[in-house]
Image: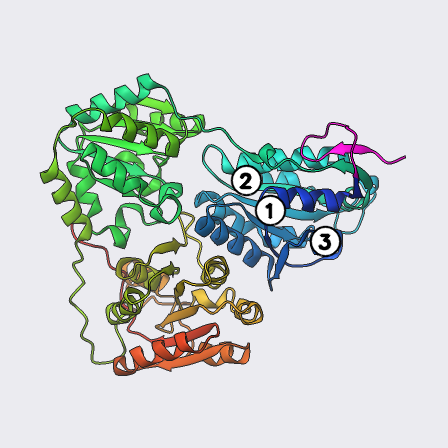
Amino acid sequence: MLKQVEAGSGQRLEGDETGRGADLLVRSLKAAGVTRIYSLSGNQIMPVYDACIDAGIEIVHTRHEAAAVFMADAHAQITGGLGVALVTAAPGAMNALGALYSARTSESPVLILTGDSSVSQDGMGAFQELDQVSIVRPLVKSSQRPETVEALGSALTDAIRTARSGRPGPVHIALPFDVLETETTFVPIDPSRFDISDQAGTEEDCAALLDAVDRAERPLVLMGPSLSATRQGDLAERFSNALDCPVVVMESPRGLKDPSLGAFASVLSKADLIVTFGKPIDFTLGFGKPAAPDCRWIVLDPDSAEIERARRNLGTGLIHAIQAEARPFAESVIGCARRETRAARSDWRETATRLIAARSEADRTESEGRVTPQALTRAVQSRLDKAGESIVVCDGGEFGQWAQAGTNGTRRIVNGPSGAIGGSPCYGLAAKLARPQALVYALMGDGTVGFHLAEFETAAREGAAFVAIVGNDMCWNAEHQIQLRQYGPDRLIGCQLSDARYDLAVAALGGHGEFVSDIADLDAALARAEASGKVALVNVLIEGRPAPSGTGH
């Protein structure tokens, strides 16, 4: 007799659909709005592949498991929806862990599904038997292994809601093979099961925050990665206008030295009140120490653990803590602020804007040798400015920082607070598939491109025609600069790279390649790359300069 299960709840009801656990899983994903899964195949997940055919869910088949997670991360950031990665058991799942850490720190709602050995073989030494839940749990908001088909639907519902609520982030479900193969009966899936209710905070909290901002002369608002313009549109701008104070979104591991924020450190040191919206008080803020000694802090965060961290790092400087979800609370504050006359602080906003826009290296573009990083990013920005919609991906060590400081599109993806590099070909691919009409540029160093070079074959196969720029200084320049600063020029080791022709490699993988060593040839090469209609890589020999640091750092 077939079991009768309501997908998404685990409750037994009369139903009229039959299939395997894999069919229940995939139809539930479809009801949750999933239309594309990034995956690398493997034995234990073949039932899910089979179920995707009938559900009409596209599978983008990658060349590495980490690439699938990076792509799901970018998909979530660009679309505002759930990114889904599907990988096989044990070694496949372990290959995905680095990218999963990046998704966690970037606050991206990603669901990673991993194949698993059968429950019926637990403890018997099954093929690729591994306690994945214990290993993955520290990297995600939740990790589950449903051991029956009845538990599968509710596990998926819980995971998706968890990924999207509070501080967004990745979640994990291990899929035992026998659970995927179990036959069952289930009722049609109700999409409302995946809805979440925003926790916007109290009116008292909103009033307390507005009162503190009104009494401050130089208030500063800091927002975390999930509130970036790419994900939340003009939220930060509207908040700044409503309260007449500067608002800064932080999403870089370089924190106060994020080159796209110019002399932000000096803005922080001048503030007399700092309000954080989902921005952890961590290393990116110098643990709060660079602020003025008498600066007051208000911390809003959905996670009690982050509020406790703020208490430890800020001490008596923390005057108020609010546990609520950042985006809905920000909207509540904007609504309350509109009903009253707020204090005007245009001079402070203008000062902050000027300092954040400062670029001490902006005019140092001349070089007797290779193309400079400034000249390269300026040429790319000129192309982006001509596009109606554009997405720029910035990834890597020193050149990645030049890219962050010198380029900006309609949307932007950076390699996030994790500090990991290498995901940019994957980010570019997923961004182009999500927004095919957009001009997508992915800027990376020659060290960075080596991590997922094979994904250019995936992009060619999938028709994801984005343009990759490799700023090629034939060096792991971030570490090279550390060696120069800390050990001296006679203590350089292990950071040199070759003059490998990455452009030819991409052409061989089915894309378009360009090689540039003279600035005079750059714009024409970029134009040819865009016009090729293929994924393209422009390999540009550059001078290996230290990353920009803005001014006042």
List x then y, in percent, for residue 48.
Answer: 72, 51
Total marks in image: 3
Q: How would you rate the neighbour count of disc 3 (Cα within 10 Å): few for under 14, some for 14-19, many for 20 or more?
A: few
The residue type indicated by label 3 comes to Asp
Q: Residue 140 carries which label?
A: 2
Q: Closer to the camera: disc 3 or disc 2?
A: 3
Q: Residue furthest top?
A: 204
Q: Do the residues labelled 2 and 1 touch (CB within 8 Å)?
A: yes
What main secondary structure does the magenta stretch of the protein show? loop
Q: Position of residue 5 (x, y in %)?
A: 76, 33
SS state under label 3:
helix
Which residue is disc 3 drawn over?
54
Farthest residue to the front: give it: 16
Disc 1 + disc 3, Cβ < 8 Å: no
**Gap between marks 2 and 1 measured at Cα:** 9 Å
Front residue of 301 and 479: 301
Can the viewer see residue 446? no
The magenta span reads 1-16
In the depicted view, which residue is nearer to us: 387 or 50?
387
Instruction: Look at the image and tell me in which quarter the N terminus lies.
Output: top right
Magenta residue check for 9: yes
Disc 1/disc 3 C-alpha distance (Å): 21 Å
Of discs 1 and 3, which sits in the foreground?
3
Circle 1 is placed at which residue position? 112
**Label drawn at residue 337:** none
Amino acid type, label 1:
Ile
Q: Which of the two labelled residues, at mark 3 and mark 2, occupies the earlier sequence position?
A: 3
- Mark 1: few/some/many CA within 10 Å (<14, 14-19, 20+): many
**Residue 482 is a magenta residue:** no
**Image height check: is 34 above or below 442?**
above
